[in-house]
């Protein structure tokens, strides 16, 4: 069998030939299954591919630090990605790759049933909202989407890496996380 889902863990998948070649492992979501907030990133980078966990590199440190600022800890939240395999040279996942992995993400959302989703950056925001997003302008806004008929609240956010290139994004990122914390509390 070339596809296996064990609870929330994808243990085998060969839907995306390029990603099968570029990944060293499948990176599943981490964090408690009863988390109120589910963060959705784009896809694993080099550090995540190596360690097998989402957001463990520099972006992860920014996320951890900002969670603390808004009164949360990484252990309180669930973190996952739109695609679970590292794209070659950290390129964006293609539309096909995103669609190939959508079922795993939606199954995770349905199973966890979090109070709020936070999309980290343009790619996950557009993927879940199904429209184009100007993420800098729209970060912090809250939208309702439907996944398999159920309403889900989404807080749009810039990607934590954006704060590394542009310090002015720190406040935008923090405000989005604060909005998510308020909604979840
Ligand atoms: N960026 C992402 O979008 N996801 C990760 O897991 C790491 C960096």
Image (cartoon, helix red, strand yellow):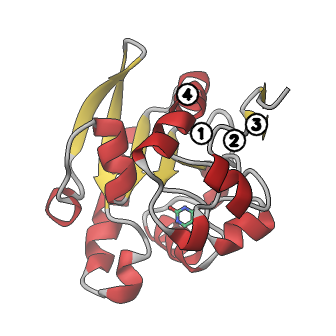
Could you classify mark 3 by the number of other residues whose Cα lies within 10 Å: few (under 14), some (14-19), or many (20 or more)?
Answer: some
User: Given this view, does label 4 or label 2 mark the residue nearer the observer?
Assistant: 4
* Nearer to me, 16 or 73: 16
The outermost residue toward the right is: 1
Q: Residue 103 shows which numbered tag?
A: 4
Callout 3: helix, strand or loop?
strand
The circle on residue 16 is none
Confirm whether residue 178 shows in the render: no
Q: Position of residue 128 (x, y in %)?
A: 36, 38
- Residue 116, given in percent of the width and then of the height, sits at 41, 37
First along the sequence among labels 4 and 1: 1
Q: Could you tell whether 169 is left or right of 31 in the image?
A: left
Residue indicated by mark 3: 9
Image position, residue 130 (x, y; %):
27, 36
Q: In the shown orientation, is residue 29 left or right of residue 9?
A: left
Mark 1 touching mark 2, by CB under 8 A?
A: yes
Give the Cα distance between marks 1 and 2: 5 Å
**Is there CB contact under 8 Å for labels 3 and 1?**
no
Dividing the picture into quadrants, the one containing residue 148 is top left
Residue at figure coordinates x 50%, y 64% from the top left? 67
* Mark-to-mark CA distance, 3 and 1: 16 Å
Toward the viewer: 60 or 66? 60
Measuring 30% from the left and 46% from the top, which residue is drawn there? Answer: 126
| Pair 3/2: label in front | 3
């Amino acid at each position: 069998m070339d596809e296996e889902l064990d609870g929330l863990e994808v243990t085998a998948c060969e839907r995306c030939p390029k990603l099968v070649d570029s990944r060293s492992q499948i990176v599943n979501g981490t964090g408690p299954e009863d988390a109120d907030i589910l963060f959705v990133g784009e896809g694993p980078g080099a550090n995540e591919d190596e360690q097998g966990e989402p957001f463990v590199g520099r972006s992860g440190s920014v996320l951890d630090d900002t969670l603390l600022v808004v009164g949360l800890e990484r252990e309180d939240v669930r973190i996952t990605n739109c695609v679970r395999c590292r794209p070659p040279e950290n390129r964006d996942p293609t539309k096909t790759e995103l669609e190939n992995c959508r079922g795993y993400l939606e199954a995770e959302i349905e199973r966890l049933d979090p109070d709020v989703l936070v999309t980290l950056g343009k790619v996950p925001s557009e993927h879940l909202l199904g429209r184009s997003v100007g993420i800098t302008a729209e970060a912090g806004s809250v939208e309702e989407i439907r996944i398999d008929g159920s309403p889900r609240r989404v807080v749009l956010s810039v990607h934590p890496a954006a704060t590394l290139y542009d310090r002015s994004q720190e406040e935008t990122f923090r405000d989005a996380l604060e909005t998510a914390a308020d909604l979840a509390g």
